[in-house]
Image: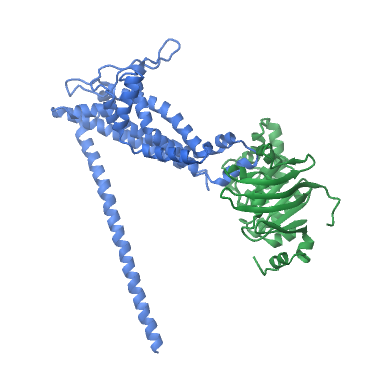
Amino acid sequence: MEHKASVLENLADVRAMIKRHKRNDSVFAVIGLICLMLGLITLMLLFWQLIADGYPKFTLDFLSEFPSRRAGKAGLLSAWVGSVLVMTVTFITAVPVGVAAGLYLEEYAPKNWFTDLIEINVSNLAGVPSIIYGLLALGLFVYILDFGQSILTAGLTLGLLILPIVIVSTREAIRAIPVSIREAAYGVGATKWQVVYDHVFKYSYGGILTGIIIGMARALGETAPIITIGALTFIAFLPPSPITMEPPFLNFEWLSSGFTVMPIQMFNWLSRPDHAFHINAAATGALIIVVTLLMNGTAIWLRYRIRKNIKW
Amino acid sequence: MATVTTPIKAEARDLNFFYSNGARALKGITMPLYENKITALIGPSGCGKSTFLRCFNRMHDLYPGNQYQGQIVMHPDNTNVLDQGVDPIEVRMRISMVFQKPNPFPKSIYENVAYGLRVRGENNKRIMDDKVEEALKGAALWNEVKDRLHDLAFNLSGGQQQRLCIARALATDPEIMVFDEPTSALDPIATANIEELMVELRSKLTILVVTHNMQQAARVSDYTAYMYLGELIEYDDTDKIFTNPSRKETEDYITGKFG
């Protein structure tokens, strides 16, 4: 009988202990939820504020008018065209270089102290403040290479800025491919390039694309480096059109044109004393956020679509 | 040895192997693979049997720092496949491999089998179709997949996936096929299918199989090699190894006293 009593007592202890441990579970869950909500709600409020402030300017005219001294007439035309052109240059330069560098580092480069050094530095570059890129670009592209304060300079600067993001995400996407798939390909007599092109690249491009889109979304909102290289804040003209009516139908004068981009236009309007301009700034901010969210959403959707057929 | 008249397809001659960390995984292995026979490698985990098998198609070359010493000579041309002057790609075209876990590419069934041909630059659709059909028939998979050749390979069961991998290895007409524990991830029925298939394939090529399962070695192989700590302890007819081994270590392992 004594023995049975001690078992029961023991059981009560065990139950008390489980209860205590479970309380820790719920305490952490609540703390975590509060932290999540703090971040999320702050962002939602900010976004909502932008929408509420900028609401009067959500018109097509806002997109088709040049900036003006009168706030009511001022529009975003030169800014969004500038953003699109700058992003085009960024895409064309950062994507091939970044993806090729990532593929090389992961598949071809020998593993030694030198490649380790490169690897650490590439990851660190992703964390360098963007204004530093602006200073580098001012010295290299504007003064030494004499590209001027142009779309080309801005596009290359942002390209440099997102290069580490593209390289790192490329490498991560490649690393997700199991060794067994590589060995299977080598096993039937494939060369390194055949393995990289037929398998590594084909199975990882969902992840690579995600990295590219997230990098581009970051570049879209960057202001500091563009100001550093000396982008103009008041542009009442469009760069020459990249596409022409006469052969050869392509025109590259736009690359050396002066320009502005959306975050700079927003910054410019925000720094004016007249409140009417602040409405324009809020509307621009809302537009940048919407475009960024759309790009990130596309990235998530693409990754989901592409990963669906691949299981390992 | 009973079948002295059987020609030798390949033989290891005093083969040593060192991993990049300096560990010596194989110690002076000398043994033949007879043509159109199945040779099984048995031994406890870590004895070097997979390491030995992977020397045959130079898989170790994929990882820097690994080093071979000695020879694996293929007949009738007397090529030492481990010679630095011999391209590992050429070796892999002659000796194909089936892995422990089924590892089909995330492509269609057809493309999986055709990949070895594509790698060789084959583009003619008629030839490809024929070769794919022949390989799938050879791997006893044709009847199950002929109506859905363009489905994803991942939709097949584990055993079917492994037979697909055998078809992929078969499509390029290799002289030798090496199997690295081909059934360890499969259920008993799928295992029986693969074993039956290996016995059928013997008429076309020479087979080397690593297995953890001694009954499997006894069921399918003609010759068996027992390895321990990187050394070849005993090599003989499978019947002899399992009924009357000449070494005490082999007997202990076979009878389950050890391992």
- Relative to residue A260, is residue A116 depicted above or below? below
Seen in the image, is B139 located left or right of residue A98?
right
Residue A223 visible within the image: no
Q: Nearer the viewer, residue B124 or B145?
A: B124
Q: Chain A: what color?
A: blue
The x and y percentages for residue A244 are 40, 13
Q: Quadrant of the N terminus of chain A?
A: bottom left
Report the residue that reaches farthest toward the bottom: A1
Residue B130, image quadrant: top right
Q: Nearer the viewer, residue A143 or A91?
A: A143
Q: Nearer the viewer, residue B175 or B203?
A: B175
Seen in the image, is B245 located left or right of residue A72?
right
Report the residue that reaches farthest toward the top: A246
Q: Chain B: what color?
A: green
Count of marks overlaid on the render? 0
- Residue drawn at point x = 37 percent, y = 14 percent: A253
